[in-house]
Image (cartoon, grey):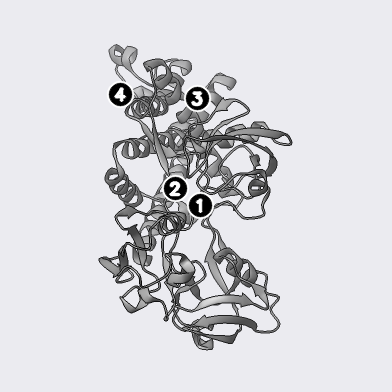
Amino acid sequence: MFGEQPGDSIAEADKSVSFTHKTVWQRIAIVLAGPIMNFLFAILVFFVVALVGEEMRSPVMGDVKTGSIAYEAGLRSGDRVLSVNGKAVRTWDELQVELTKNIGQTAQLEVAEYRLQDKVKLVKVPIQAKNNPNILSTVERVGDIEGISFFAKGTAVAVSGRSPLAVVGLQTGDFISAVNGRATEKWRDVEDHLNNLPTNEGLELQVKRLMDEKGKMQDLTVNLAAGVVKSYSLQSLGLESAETYLGKVMEDSPAMMAGLKAGDKILSIDSKSILGWDDVLNTIRQYQGSEPLNIEIMRGEAKQNIKVMPKVSEMQNQNGIEEKRFAIGIQPVPNMAASETTVIKSDSVGSAALRGVERTWDITAMTVMSFVRLFEAKVSPKNIGGVISIGQAAHDTFKMGLSQFLTMMAIISVNLFILNLLPVPVLDGGHLVFYTIEAVKGSPLSLKKMEIAQQIGIILLMSLMAFALFNDFSRLFRS
């Protein structure tokens, strides 16, 4: 900007248009203009997204745990929540907000039943408080109904060797995508479609089979003639969800050394029955480090007991923090269904503008909290990314759709808004510190002090850029 060079090199006639010769408040306004423009641009982008429509998670129950408070109250897997205490909810986020408002109370939920969406039931259920799983949120405790989540089992199937479907080619780990032409996205869809299929009809399963670790899938059709089985129940077909089956055993891991193999079903660990993969993870994490774990498995038609000595491994948690915990080197068959989504559009320009401001403010608060969590060591610095990460995010979101791509643009703009306001010399925030000091003391800092501060700022900024690029390349090589 003209006039940022030392004042004595500015001709007298040019001082009226020189940045250095503006008042301190004018200079503060000029420096603030850049970051504020990033903030306003984010509002504009979120305004457009609100008009185009945002794809958001629907308020639909995932797999409700049997015996939980939610189940006993009457909620079932696949139920859709329509309102909480009379307040309509359209998304899972809105449901979460209403639950948080009613912590410690019994709320009345208006619910559309999964199998009969036109049938509405009223469910009264107590709302408990739990720690917010989103560590970037400013809200520490949120409302919860014990037993609910938006997670649901996918359609990965396990098939016994004696099953008639195994004879015609179905394999453990296959994903059932349709039953007699009816699409299946979740395990409960598979169960429903099979239970409603007349036995005088043949059975046709559309199947996707994972061919390699890169995710290449093969489409197959498995047919079973009518009359082969008395009913199309899971039991008579010899089918079950592959939730507790091993999808992969790591090379040179304790599990491989002990003899565990892909396709094994884990029945129990140290006499604790295994009902889901969470049971496997939690049991291994609680290992006391003394005796080997006794793992009972089903391999083919035979039960076996295998002793495995866990070892301490460094792993990243969901926040990217390196943690040391016990592991044995196993992975499940990937079996998580995609959550149901809905597109939410603003019904007016005014509501879209309000949504733009709200979303920008939320992302700003989360971005500030990400810096706080970095300094608290609750978020790993490995999450910091540079131009390569930005390019990958832009590429991925562009393939997902317009609203996702625009949302990423807005998030980047908010990041620039926050980053430029950091009190680091050479950034706008550093200039604001200089001008604030000048406004308070009535005179600017000496050129010598500002030059030293600028040099330190450049070193800090270049170091941050180098670290971000290092993380980018590390992620590329790991992938």
> For the residue carrying disc 4, how many other residues have a C-alpha within 10 Å: few (<14), some (14-19), or many (20+)?
few
Residue of label 1: 151
Q: Amino acid at mark 1?
A: Phe
Q: Return the x and y of residue 183 as percentages of the image width and height.
A: 34, 53
Q: Determine whether the residue tagged by mark 1 lies in a helix, strand or loop.
A: loop
Tags 1 and 2 touching, CB below 8 Å: yes
Residue of label 4: 2
- 107 vs 168, nearest the viewer: 168
The label on residue 435 is 3
Q: CA distance from mark 1 to mark 2?
A: 7 Å
Mark 4 or mark 3, which has the lower sequence index? 4
Mark 1 or mark 4, which has the lower sequence index? 4
Q: CA distance from mark 3 to mark 2?
A: 50 Å
Q: Can I make out residue 36 in this image?
A: yes
- 66 vs 130, nearest the viewer: 66
Q: Quadrant of the C terminus?
A: bottom left
Q: Determine whether the residue tagged by mark 2 lies in a helix, strand or loop.
A: loop
Q: Nearer the viewer, mark 1 or mark 3?
A: 1
Q: Amino acid at mark 2?
A: Ser
Q: CA distance from mark 1 to mark 4?
A: 57 Å
Mark 2 or mark 4, which has the lower sequence index? 4
Q: CA distance from mark 4 to mark 3?
A: 17 Å
- 140 vs 18, nearest the viewer: 140
Q: CA distance from mark 2 to mark 4?
A: 54 Å
